[in-house]
Amino acid sequence: MSASIQGRIFFSFLRIGLLGFGGGPSMIPLVHQEVVKRHGWLEDEEFADILAIANTLPGPIATKMPGYIGYRIGGLAGCINAVLAVILPMIVAMILMLGLFSRYRDVSWIHGMGQGVVPVVMVMMAQLAWDFLHKSRLVLGWTVSLAMAVIAGGLIYWVGIHPGWVIGAILVTALLQPISKAKAAEGTAP
């Protein structure tokens, strides 16, 4: 694998690590921006599949997604490169911020900083959710998309089922759906 692609992987995920304030969920729109929109390494559907699978696996999504995407783009070196790039800013920031926090923890504006970030993360997540709803509407239509969102939300928030189980059930259902002959012909056409 060329050094050029490894450099692009490293700096893309370093940017995500530097700007992804708020942890893994806040990084998802940044990862999408870098790998789908900026570099075109993945299509939207591929990114959605990776996100769904990453949500079902244990561990932090902030390292699972970069690891898989880096591996897919640049092999084992790309995987290591992406994970190191995304965690390096977190490690440095944690050391610096914990030192500062322990020194200035009683200052009132320090408390306000954390609360000020919450709306920004909410807007980023809402934008990503809207993008996925729009893509779902294009493929499935409004009725099916909204029904799936309401049912999934009900199962997660009111019944208390873990989101991984809901996503897994949707993936299994999609895998078990028969492919129509017209769709199969589209997939085999040159």
Image (tube, rainbow, N blue to C red):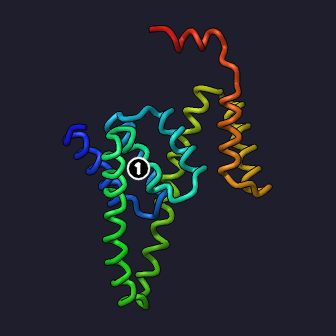
Query: Residue 48's spot in the image, x, y percent?
Result: 52, 39
Q: Is residue 95 above or below residue 118?
A: below
Query: Residue 137's spot in the image, x, y percent?
Result: 61, 30
Q: Amino acid at mark 1?
A: Pro
Query: Residue 160's spot in the image, x, y percent?
Result: 76, 58
164 and 149: which is toward the camera: 164
Q: Quadrant of the C terminus?
A: top left
Query: Residue 70's spot in the image, x, y percent?
Result: 36, 45
- Residue at 70%, 25% (x, y): give it: 177
Q: Which residue is mark 1?
A: 66
Q: SS of the residue at dot 1? A: helix
- Residue at 62%, 9% (x, y): give it: 182
- Residue at 55%, 32% (x, y): give it: 135
Q: Quadrant of the N terminus?
A: top left
Residue that sits furthest to the right in the current view: 159
Q: Is residue 46 above or below residue 129?
A: above
In the drawing, does residue 3 fall left or right of residue 55?
left
Residue that sits furthest to the left in the current view: 3
- Residue at 64%, 27% (x, y): give it: 140
Residue that sits furthest to the front in the current view: 76
